[in-house]
Image (spheres, rainbow, N blue to C red):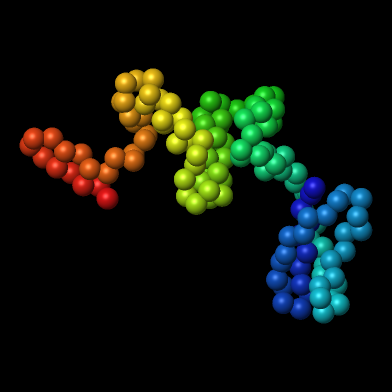
Amino acid sequence: MPIYVYKNPKTNESIEVIQSMTEDHVYIDEDGLEWKRVFIPSQLNTEASIDPWSNSDFVEKTRDTKGSYGDMLDRSSELSEKRANQNGGVDPVRQKYFKDYSEKRNGAKHPKDNQKKVYENKHVKIDLS
């Protein structure tokens, strides 16, 4: 659904309102004041509707989009952040991938798996926590 911008005639404050294209484009606040509509090209964001927990949803929404491999990685990273925010700061899909990676490689860690906070050998000890 498109986003429409309205401006308070008294304070010049702007607000974005999501409305259907078939609705009357009028915004009246709780005090009964009718805000003036600011005419800008309406925009529709279809990418925001990707479910971060669904592999098939990601594939369906990105199948016919144009862009580079880097764009796909960026979109995947955004979804990972959403999953982490919904799960207390940890993305379980990413953690499972790191675990599977390690198991397939006899315990070797993925380069981006930074769970290990202390690196130590016989000459030096580095604590990153």
Left of 76 or right of it: where is 112? left
Residue 114 in the image: x percent, y percent? 34, 39
Residue in the foreground of this view, choosing between 85 and 102: 102
Residue 122 higher or lower than 86, as above or below: above
Question: Is residue 75 in sight in this rendering?
Answer: yes
Question: Is residue 62 in sight in this rendering?
Answer: no
Left of 24 or right of it: where is 60? left
Residue 121 higher or lower than 19, as above or below: above
**Residue 17 location, quadrant:** bottom right
Residue 66 in the image: x percent, y percent? 64, 26
Residue at the location (72% across, 77% down)?
11
Residue at the location (45% across, 36% down)?
95
**Residue 8 location, quadrant:** bottom right
Residue 53 in the image: x percent, y percent? 61, 38
Residue 74 in the image: x percent, y percent? 53, 36
Residue at the location (51% across, 35% down)?
93
Q: Tag count in the figure?
A: 0
Residue in the foreground of this view, choosing between 11 and 70: 70
Residue 91 higher or lower than 73, as above or below: below
